[in-house]
Amino acid sequence: MTLMQDFEKVDDGDAIFLSAKMKVLIGTFVIGPTVIGLLGVIPMIYWGLFSWLDLGLFLGFWAITALGITVGYHRYFTHGSFKTNRPVKIALGVMGSLALEGSINQWVADHRKHHKFSDEVGDPHSPWRFGTSKRAVAKGLMFAHMGWLFSEEQATVDKYAPDIRDDVDIQRIDSWFKPLVFVTIVLPGVIGGLVTWSWIGFLTGLFWGGFVRIAFVHHVTWSINSICHVFGKRPFKSRDLSSNVAWLAIPSFGESWHNAHHADPTCARHGVLKGQIDPSAGLIRTLERLNLAHDVRWPRPERLAKKLVDPQMAPRIRGYRAPEASGDTVRG
């Protein structure tokens, strides 16, 4: 692959431009939780304001919102890795919206554009946009992680996500943005307050289950854009520099098997090699077994084997069998 570094080029009709007001709004939700979390974590722990209940609120809301992004926004809405019914579609949309990563419309549009131009001109968040020197890559990592969210160049929904734009249910969910912001921040505090029957329980629940959890989910998601395009292993052939980063697998619910994802974008499982943990694929498999998901695009070992850089790694693919018996689709 040849890296194209003229990332300042903007294709006419292929981007929208953020207003100053929108940048301030994005900054509030992008930087706010991170700053609150960084300033408050050490004092809260020092003062003993972190309990098993707070840990449970953090983990519970992390799972709900992160899976809303990985299974909902990403694998379902963006790539159509499976089909489901209307109630599950709405549930996934609401779960993802509670992560405060923007509207389903724009998230899907940006990600589809990323796949179309991955690590080339037009990619909304490639870490290679400034060059390949150490300084350029360091600058690119910051841009790919958070900076691109403030970039004036954004993918157009009309071009990249017309199916999402025309979905009445999704547009209704997007219209609920303000109340969902309130719910995702305040609900952990309300639960903490009711369980402990105290204002301290409310405040600690608000902090750990609200602000800290939102910041954590944000940075894990952004790490897929930054870290997983610079560091890690690349066992599969792809036209970009997407990579697998094992230590991010659990925090990202399997999204960090990013090289495999770019090699086969619509596949419902990203952790396609033996031993690769992919909780998001586990949820999709559970939905399928409950007849809540169908037409799931599970990986095909024979297809993946052809994409390996080293063909001798084929036995490591889940469900791989000798060529004469490798025609079945692997489920989950």
Image (cartoon, grey):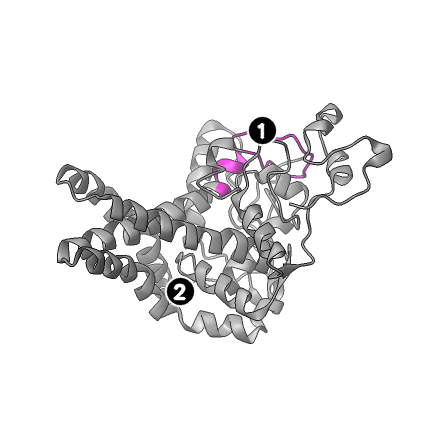
Q: Secondary structure at mark 2?
A: loop
Q: Amino acid at mark 1?
A: Lys
Query: Where is residue 141, by image quadrant?
Result: top left
Secondary structure predominantly adopted by residues drawn in magenta: loop
- Whether the magenta-drawn stretch holds residue 229 is answered as yes
Q: Residue pushed farthest front?
A: 290
Res 32 seen here: no
Question: Residue 208: x, y in percent?
Answer: 26, 49
User: Closer to the camera, 8 or 278?
Assistant: 278
Residue depicted at x 75% and y 45%: 329
Question: Residue 186: x, y in percent?
Answer: 27, 61
Residue depicted at x 24% and y 53%: 205
Q: Amino acid at mark 2?
A: Ser
- The residue tagged 2 is 19
- The residue tagged 1 is 233
Question: Residue 52: x, y in percent?
Answer: 25, 44
Q: Is residue 304 left or right of residue 32?
A: right
Quadrant of the frame with the N terminus: top right
Distance of mark 1 from mark 2, alpha carbons? 38 Å
Q: Residue pushed farthest top?
A: 312
Residue depicted at x 51% and y 32%: 246
